[in-house]
Amino acid sequence: MDRERISRQKMSRDGDWMCAACQHLNFKKRDACQRCSCPKYATPADVAMYGLNKTEVLAGDWYCSGMNCGSHNYASRTSCYRCGALKSDYYGIEQE
């Protein structure tokens, strides 16, 4: 496992939840995401609405090439938020 995933597992406690719209890890006590305000028990329509606010691709952001994932990742991530694949693709070429 990579360091980010291990760190996230250590940080999460029973009942903590991941936002369906922006994948931010939230404490159990929160009823809405700390980052994007999407409700804890969001409907698919809610997720689509809150997720639209995060579609802007900024310099350094990258798309995961691992296992046909294709997820948009922020530049600060060293591994994919969805599948955990490293930022470098399987051919050893750095994605930017």
Image: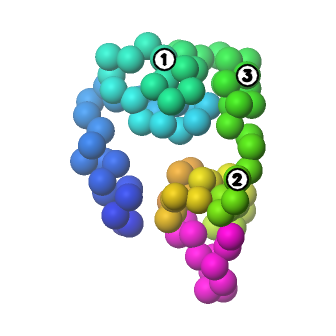
> Which stretch is magenta?
85-96
Q: In this figure, which colouring scheme has been used for the structure?
A: rainbow
Which residue position holds label 1? 32
Which residue position holds label 3? 49
In the rendered view, tell whether residue 89 sits above or below residue 73. Answer: below
Are discs 3 and 2 less than 8 Å apart at CB?
no
How far, Cα to Cα, is label 1 from label 3? 14 Å
Give the residue drawn at x 69%, y 59%: 59
Quadrant that contains the N terminus? bottom left
Labels in figure, total:
3
Which residue position holds label 2? 58
Give the mark, 2 or 1, whose residue is nearer the N terminus. 1
- Pointer 3 local density, CA inside 10 Å: few below 14, some 14–19, many at least 20: few
In the rendered view, tell whether residue 49 sits above or below residue 58. Answer: above
Q: Which mark is residue 51?
A: none
When asked about the image quadrant of residue 37, the answer is top right
